[in-house]
Image (cartoon, helix red, strand yellow):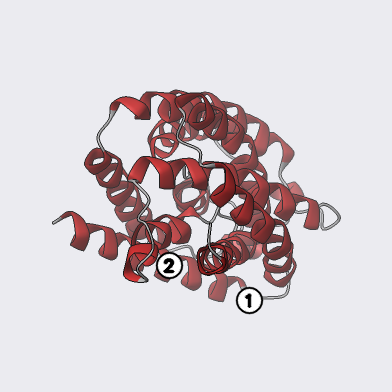
Amino acid sequence: MTVESILVLFVIGFLGSFLSGLVGIGGSIIKYPLLLYVPPLLGMAAFTAHEVSGISAVQVFFATLAGVIALRKDNLVHVRLVLYMGSAVVVGSFLGAYGGRYLSGDVVNLVYGLLATVAAVMMFLPKKGLDDRKLEEVTFNRWLATLSAFLVGIASGIVGAAGAFILVPIMLSVLKVPTRVTIASSLAITFLSSIGSATGKLLAGDVLLWPSIVMVIASVIAAPLGAKLSTRMNTKLLQALLAVLILGTAMKIWLEIL
């Protein structure tokens, strides 16, 4: 790897991981298109869709782990929600990640585009009174939470994304979980999801060693910074930021597919 390629990968990993900690996602909503399109634009060798999904899966594991550690003292993680959704998404993401080896790069991109579109629509649904409840007052439908997490795990495992960018809208719009609890809990859920996703991609042979190492180093630096900043930001601003990120990425992916 050249110095230029290392720097580009580090910047991509840092940006994605900072946003990962900030809004409770794994960061692939940003890193996936950046890894796919930026290197060839700069005259570097292009990664295939499978290689991008493999690098993303490993990087998400470390980014979310760093984010959870940074928020461990803030008492915002809903343990039961994490257990129900986390266990379901681990199984689903492993099946999706390993099964993704039998799909073409175009199909992988199509799945990513569909996920981003659904997530973007859900982020714009009304959420009145959502943040009025404290952690101990939060309740949810455990069957709906488990089923949705399993299905998201399968789809997101295919693209190595860990699924938080669609789990967050589900937790906010469907399960009615407050924003800060959603961000902290989704980081924990995404960490569990990334175990299955990263394992599946490793077994499928989709993980490139040195690009992954560079991205991981960027992750453990940036994710805690974003996580700490999220506890000080207005919740409406956090929701708006996530909505814009998901919508912009969905539009970019669909323009490339079409």
Q: Position of 11 compared to 52: left or right? A: right
Residue nearest the viewer, comparing 241 with 249: 249
Q: Could you tell me residue 242's position as x and y percent? A: 48, 66
Seen in the picture, residue 75 relative to 125 is either above or below; the reply is above
Residue nearest the viewer, comparing 176 with 111: 111
Seen as rendered, the residue at the extreme left is 258
Q: How many labels does the image show?
A: 2
Q: Name the residue under label 2.
A: 245
Whether residue 227 is visible, yes or no, is yes
Task: Determine the CA span between mark 2 and mark 1.
Answer: 17 Å
Q: Could you tell me residue 174's position as x and y percent? A: 46, 47
Q: Please report whichever mark, 2 or 1, sits nearer to the chain's N-terminal start.
A: 1
Q: Position of 214 compared to 108: left or right? A: right
Seen as rendered, the residue at the extreme right is 73
Q: Could you tell me residue 257's position as x and y percent? A: 18, 54
Q: Residue type at mark 1? A: Asn
Q: Which residue is drawn at 52% across and 48% down?
A: 171
Whether residue 162 is visible, yes or no, is no
Q: In which quarter of the image is residue 179?
A: bottom right
Q: Quick one: SS at disc 2?
A: helix
Residue nearest the viewer, comparing 141 with 99: 99
Q: Name the residue under label 1.
A: 234
Q: Which tag is nearer the camera, tag 2 or tag 1? A: 2
